[in-house]
Image (cartoon, rainbow, N blue to C red):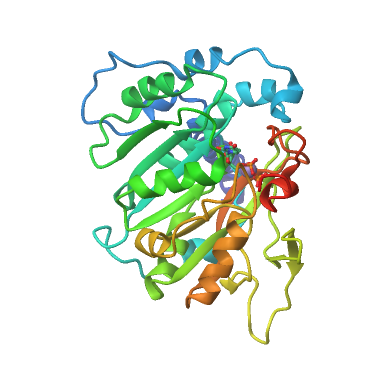
Amino acid sequence: MFAGRNNGRPRRCIFYILAFLFSQFLFILIFLRSESFDNVPFRQQIKHDNDSWDHYLDWREFISYTSERSAKFYLYNLNLSNTLGVIRKLPSTRHYSCGYRPRKLPPPSKANVSVVISFHNEARSMLLRTIVSLLARTPEDHLHELILVDDGSQDVTLLNDLRRWMGGVFGARHRLGLQFLANRERMGLIWSRNRGASLASGHYVLFLDSHCEVNEGWLEPLLERLALNPQLAVSPVLDPIDPLTLAYRKGNELLKGGFDWSLHFHWLRRQLAEKELPEMPFKSPAFAGGILMMSREWFLKLGGFNSYLKIWGGESIELATKLWLCGGQIEIVPCSRIGHIFRRRHAFDFPPQSDAQETYLHVRLI
Ligand code: UDP
Ligand code: MN
C-alpha cells in the first residue's frame, strides 16, 4: 500500500512542474503580446471603418523627409527620436489611485476639447509622437478636433505631408475635426495659439507644445475639474522628457507655478495642508508651463493671450493675471500627466539683438 503511494509521488511532481512551466509560458506569452503593441505599425492599432489606404503615407517615409540639420538645431537627440517610433509605452507616473477612482465626467456633448498645437521648426518624428500619443490616449468622444498651426517652419512640405499622413491614418474618425493652418510668415507662439483658438469649436481648448507625449488617462481628471467650475483653467503635471536620452521621468507634483517682478516664471514648493494628499488638484498662481486647458468661450471672453506679446513668453503669466482679476482660478491636476521636453535654451531665434526676456518685456520692440 505504502509502496503504491510512493510510486504516484514522482508522477504528481512531474505534473506540478509541467503545470508550473505551462503557466509561466502563458504568462510570458501574454506579456509579450502587450509589449508588442509599440512595435505594431500604428495603422493596425487604430479602429477603422474603411480599409482603404490609398493616400496613406507611411510614418517612416514621413520622417525620412526630415531636413538635414545639425543636432544644435533642435537641441534634442534627433537620431534617437527618429528611431523611437510614433508611440511608445510610457511609465505610469501618477499616483496609483488616479487610475481606479471613478470619475464624474460630463457627457461628450457637453465636454469636448479642441487641441491647438503651434509649432516652429519641430522635428517631424517629435511632432508625430505628440500627435499620435494624443490621438491614441484620448477618449474619442471627448476629442472634438485637432488644430495644427505651422508657424513659419523652414520645412516647407511638413504641413502638407502631415495632412497626407493623417488623412490616411485618421480619416475614418468621423468625429475628429482636423485643421491644418500655415502662417504666412512666422508670427510667434502667442499669435498662433490665438489664431487656433479663434477657429476652434469645442467646449474646451487645450494648448499643447509640439514636443510632448500625453500619458494614459490625461484628459479625464482635467475634464472632471473643469465641469465643477467653468471659470477654471487647468494644467497637468508636466513629466520631464530628457532632451538627450528621451527618457520619460516623473514630474514633481509638489511644485506650483509663480513669477517675480521681472515676469520670470519660477517653480515654487508648496506645503500640503492637513489631510491634503499630493495627488489632489491644487491651486497655483500661474500655470505649470504653457500647457493649459480651459473653456474656449471663457478664454475668448478674457481676450485670449495678449496680442502685444511677440514670439514667445509672458503669455501664460498674463493670462493667469487676467484670470485672477476676472474671477477665474488656476489648478494643477497631478492625476493628469503630460511628458514635455524641457530644453536648457531656446531652439529658435528672437528679434535681432533681443533675448526671450527682452522680447516679452518689450525692451526694444516699442
Ligand atoms: N513655437 C511657435 N512659434 C515660435 C516659437 C515657438 O509656434 O515662434 C512653438 C514651439 O514649437 C512649441 C511651443 O510654441 O510647440 C512652445 O515653445 P517652446 O517649447 O519653445 O516653449 P517652452 O516649452 O520652452 O516654454
Ligand atoms: Mn516646450
Pick out the residue farthest to the bottom.
274
Please, is residue 233 above or below residue 128 in the view? below
Q: Indicate left or right for 33 with 167 as reference.
A: right
Please, is residue 53 above or below residue 93 in the view? above
Q: Nearer the viewer, residue 86 or 3?
A: 86
Please, is residue 70 above or below residue 187 in the view? above
Q: Residue at x 45, y 52 (%)?
A: 206
Q: Indicate left or right for 204 with 261 as reference.
A: left
> How far across and how far down the image is residue 78, in percent?
68, 23
How many discs mark residues in the rendered view? 0
Q: Indicate left or right for 109 with 219 as reference.
A: left
Q: Is residue 139 visible?
A: no
Quarter of the displayed picture in which ligand 2 can be seen:
top right
> How far across and how far down the image is residue 364, in percent?
72, 45
Q: Indicate left or right for 350 with 49 as reference.
A: right
Q: Nearer the viewer, residue 35 or 196?
A: 196
Q: Is residue 251 visible?
A: yes
Please, is residue 179 above or below residue 315 in the view? above
Q: Residue at x 57, y 66 (%)?
A: 320
Q: Residue at x 64, y 26 (%)?
A: 81
Q: Quadrant of residue 25?
A: top right
Q: Nearer the viewer, residue 62 or 363?
A: 363
Q: Quadrant of residue 169?
A: top left
Q: Residue at x 45, y 23 (%)?
A: 41
> How far across and how far down the image is residue 346, in percent?
72, 38
